[in-house]
Amino acid sequence: MKAAAIIPFIFTALPSTVVWAQASSAPAASQVSLMGQLVQLGGGLLLVVGLIFLMGYLMRRVGPLAPQGGQHIRLVSSLPLGPRDRLLLIDVGGKQLLLGASPGRINTLHVFEEPVAEVAASGAMPADFARTLRGLLKREPKA
């Protein structure tokens, strides 16, 4: 039976159980009525908890609903400078920028004309990135 068919069944069958219990004898009616109400309460609780878990599963499976189209900005590398400060190398449309990021601001430190590091689809970086960056920063500008 599908979940869509079970939900209306729960809401229609449980109240009729309570009405049937009230039509019974007087001493047992209050006990059955209480039991019917507890069953209805437990069923509703299970339904709500089940829906929460179902939604969590679907959100993990589908992922975020934001469009994941062509990413034009990529984080190439990140270097922590302190507990809250970072040095970031990002690639924007083929140009690479060196940014300093702290809790209250982001500063552009340098814009590289030619790429310092290759941007791989998997995000993997070459091992000699630090050496290449130092070499490019020490290079004299051309006149």
Image (cartoon, rainbow, N blue to C red):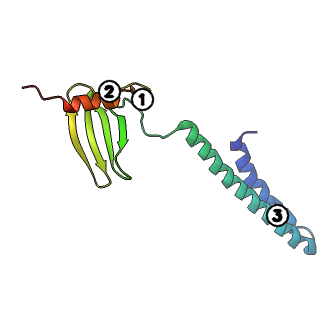
Return the x and y of residue 22 as percentages of the image width and height: 85, 68
Residue visible at 32% across and 40% down in the picture: 88
Residues packed near mark 1 inside 10 Å, few (<14), some (14 to 19) or many (20 plus): few
Front residue of 35/128: it is: 128
Q: From the viewer's perspective, is 46 left or right of 122?
A: right
Q: Which numbered tag is attached to residue 51?
A: none
Task: Residue at the far bottom: name it.
Answer: 27
Q: Residue at x 37, y 29 (%)?
A: 70
SS at circle 3 = helix
Q: Residue 118, image x and y in percent? A: 34, 24
- How far apart marks 3 and 1 lie (CA) works out to 58 Å
Asked if one can make out residue 72 in the rendered structure from this viewpoint, the answer is no
- Is the C terminus in the top left, top right, bottom left or bottom right quadrant? top left
Mark 2, other Cα within 10 Å: few <14 / some 14–19 / many ≥20: many
Residue 39 can be seen, yes or no = yes
The quarter holding residue 96 reads top left
User: In the rendered structure, which amino acid carries the disc numbered 2?
Assistant: Ala
Q: Specify the quadrant of the image occupied by residue 130.
A: top left
- Residue annotated with mark 3: 36
Which of 47/83 is in front? 83
Residue 28 percent location from the top left of the image: 92, 71
Three-letter amino acid code at disc 3? Gly
Q: Which mark is residue 117?
A: 2
Give above or below for 55 relative to 35.
Answer: above
- Distance from Cα at disc 2 to Cα at disc 1: 11 Å
- Pointer 2 with pointer 1, Cβ within 8 A: no
SS at mark 2?
loop
Residue type at numbered disc 1: Gly
| Residue to which mark 1 is pinned | 123
Q: Earlier in the sequence, mark 3 or mark 1?
A: 3
Residue in the foreground of this view, choosing between 23 and 75: 75
